[in-house]
Image: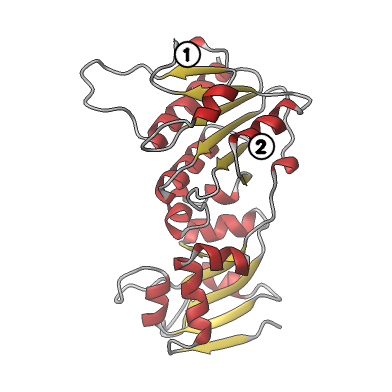
Amino acid sequence: MARTLQVSVRNAKFQQWETLLRNRNKRHRAGSFLVQGVRPISLAVEHGWTVEALLYDADRPRLSDWARGLLERPHTEQAAVSGELLAELGEKDEDNPPELLAQVKIPERRLADLATRPDWLGIVIDRPTSPGNVGSLIRSADAFGADAVVITGRNAADPYDPKAVRASTGSLFALPVVSAASAHEVAEWARKQPHAPMIIGTDERGEQTLSEHDLGGPTLLVVGNETTGMSKSWFELADATARIPMSPKAASSLNAANAGSVALYEAARQRAA
C-alpha cells in the first residue's frame, strides 16, 4: 500500500519539492522533477515514466475521477498537501490550486541510446537559454514526427525546468530528449551511425533555402542559440547550412523555437510528399 504524507506547513518535505522547481543543480542531483497539469501527468504515466510521488489537494472536498484513478496506483508515495501550499508548487493562484501534481524520475538517457534508421529525424537545440523555447521545440518535434531532441551546451536550458515542461504540453514524455556537452560529441555520434544523418544547420547566411535540401533521408537539423545563432563548431561540423526564406520587410529574424518549428515542418512536408 502507498503511504500518505500530510503536509500543511512549509516543512523540509515541502522545501524539497520547492527545490525541484527552482534549483536546476539540486533537481538533477535528486534525479526528479515536478510535473504540473492534467495532460503532462497523464502522458508521463502513459509513456511509462516513473512516478515517485503524487501530491494532491487535501482541502478539496472531492477529487476528480482522473485524480482518484492515479492515486489508486500501487506503490506510489502520496502526499496530502494543503491547497495553499499545492498552489505554490503548481505555480497557480492561491484560490485555484491544482488538484494533483506528480514528482517524476529524470530518466538516464545518452546519445548512445539513440538508434537511427533510413527515415530518422532529429533536431539539435544549440546552447538554448530559454526553457520555454526548449519546451516549445520539443512540442514541435513531437508534432512533426521527429525521433529525438538533442540539447547541446554545458549551460543550456534544462528540459526539466517547469517552464520547459509546461511549454512542451506533455511532449517531453513522448520522445527521447538527451543532452550533450558539445557539438563535437553529437557530430561524432552521428558519423558512427549505420544510417548516419545529414547534419543541416539553420542560419540566415545559408547559401540555399531549407526547401532546396533533401530532408527525406536520415536528418539532424540544428537550431542555434536565441541571441548568437549556431556556434562556430556547428558551422564547421554541419554538412550544409540552410536559410529559411523571410520577407524583405521583416523587422527581425525568427526566434529559435519558431525557426526550429519551420525546419521540422519542412522535413515533414518533404517526407509526406
**Three-letter code, disc 2:** Glu
**Other residues around mark 2 within 10 Å, as few (<14) / some (14–19) / many (≥20):** few
- Hey, which quadrant is residue 215 in on the image? top right
Quarter of the rendering occupied by the N terminus? bottom right
Name the residue rendered at 67%, 57% in the picture.
107
**Is residue 64 visible to the viewer in this orientation of the structure?**
no
Name the residue rendered at 66%, 72% in the picture.
73
Numbered disc in front, either 2 or 1: 2
Q: Is residue 115 above or below residue 85?
A: above
Q: Is residue 155 above or below residue 71?
A: above
Q: How is the image coloured?
A: secondary structure
Q: Position of residue 184 (x, y in %)?
A: 63, 33
Q: CA distance from mark 2 to mark 1?
A: 27 Å
160 relative position to 244: left or right: right
Q: Which mark is residue 185?
A: 2
Q: Position of residue 187 (x, y in %)?
A: 65, 30
Q: Which residue is mark 1?
A: 211
Name the residue rendered at 59%, 70% in the picture.
69
Q: Is residue 136 above or below residue 82?
A: above
Q: Which mark is residue 235?
A: none
Q: Position of residue 169 (x, y in %)?
A: 46, 50
Name the residue rendered at 66%, 28% in the picture.
120
**Three-letter code, disc 1:** Ser
Secondary structure at numbered mark 1: helix
Secondary structure at numbered mark 2: helix
Quarter of the rendering occupied by the C terminus? top right
